[in-house]
Amino acid sequence: MMIKANKYKKNQGRLIIFLGFIVLIVLFKLPVFANNIDDWASPLNNAQILLAKQKYKDALVVFKKQADLDNGLAQFNVALFYDLGWGIPLNRATACQWYQKAAKNNMPGAMQALGQCFLEGQGVEQNKKLAYHWFIKAFEQGIAEGAFQAGELLLSGDGIEINLIAGQRLCLEAAQQGSISAQKKLAQWYFDGQYFPQDYQQAFNWLQRVASEKSPSSAYLLAQFYDQGIGMDVDESQALRWYEIAASGKYQKAYLSTALLYWQQFTQAKANKEQLLAKSYLWAKISSTSLTSIQDKNVADQILAQVLQQMPETWFESLDRKIVNHLVIPQ
């Protein structure tokens, strides 16, 4: 039982997660969020079929025609074309202009995206107060991510007046309603004692919800609980499991820890040592190749030198191919 104990990339990631949800709305015809009796979806049936077939240029023609008729759902979809580069060059500024039109037509997804535009200052003049306004509007229409981003602005005081109580409340509501971004940040904040009182139990609780292959940073943080015995007994097998999940997700802080634990297990094992040795080589070599800290690189080199004394030459080709693939292929 645990006890309580003593810019852009981020924003773009949130937007992409949100846009994935919107694609489902477009392709599978989930309920449309309209603010009047107009049926925005029916005129877009053909466009949705074309989009599903990846006939982007033809679909865009239909969406634009309806967007010019003040169809909020069409306006939102036109924004997605420019934001995701469906059949056309990426154009964030133009996407934000279309998000603004759709937001004024009461499209919740567009409200969230427009808040991001004002936060970044793309397509519109940067204005954190307006970003906050649209994030809140999106949250009021059911977008949990809007509550988190509004709450984060209140906590940091970035462009708006700090309000810790309101910011904490919004972030907690967002996390409870399923915002992955909020859950990840709450875990880190409770762990560090930032914005919230330091509480390892709360940090661990939130980490259990989000630590996975999709959240390498959360997996790394969870590994530290098991590795350092924070509020629990040390559990090296669980620590190694989560370190390797983080490392496989290209979270560089996890590389050396993964290599160290695999090598430690190899030196202590009395049977089935081949996989432990192979994993020790793989992560030590990745650490030595990619880490920038001289101290960490030296440790990785020391492990690698010891591994090489044990490893058969016939293993190199297969393992080196895996190392190259990990370092080269985008995550």
Image: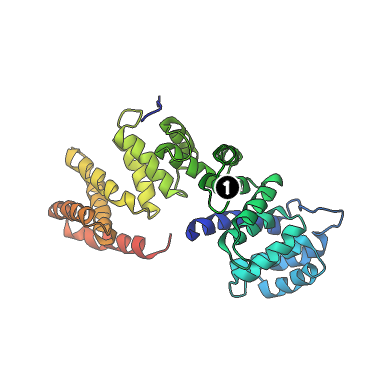
Answer with the quarter of the image where residue 27 lies: bottom right
Residue 233 x/y as whole percent: 31, 28
At x 48%, y 58%, the residue is: 7
Apparent side of residue 297 relative to residue 191 in the rendered image (left or right): left
Residue beneath label 1, please?
A: 161
Q: Nearer the viewer, residue 298 or 112?
A: 112
In-front residue for pair 27/103? 103
Outermost residue toward the front? 161
Query: Is 115 left, or right, of 312 in this rendering?
Result: right
Does residue 255 appear to the left or right of 100 in the view shown? left
Looking at the image, is 47 positioned above or below residue 240? below
Residue 84 picture quarter: bottom right
For label 1, the SS is: loop
Q: Callout 1 environment at 10 Å: few (<14), some (14 to 19), or many (20+)?
A: few
Q: Furthest-right residue in view? A: 37
Q: Looking at the figure, which quarter contains the N terminus?
A: top left
Extreme residue toward the left, this view = 309
Residue 131 seen anywhere in this rendered image of the structure: yes
51 above or below 36? below
Above or below for 160 versus 227: below
For the question of whether residue 238 can be seen, the reply is no
Name which residue lies at 53% across and 47% down.
181
Left/right of residue 236 with respect to residue 246 in the rendered view? left
The residue that appears at 41% across and 44% down in the rendered structure is 219
The mark total stands at: 1
Q: What residue lies at 76% left-to-right and 51% top-to-bottom?
A: 31
Query: Which quadrant is home to the C terminus?
Result: bottom left
Amino acid tagged 1: Glu
Q: Position of residue 92 (x, y in %)?
A: 60, 68
Residue 278 image point, x, y percent:
24, 51
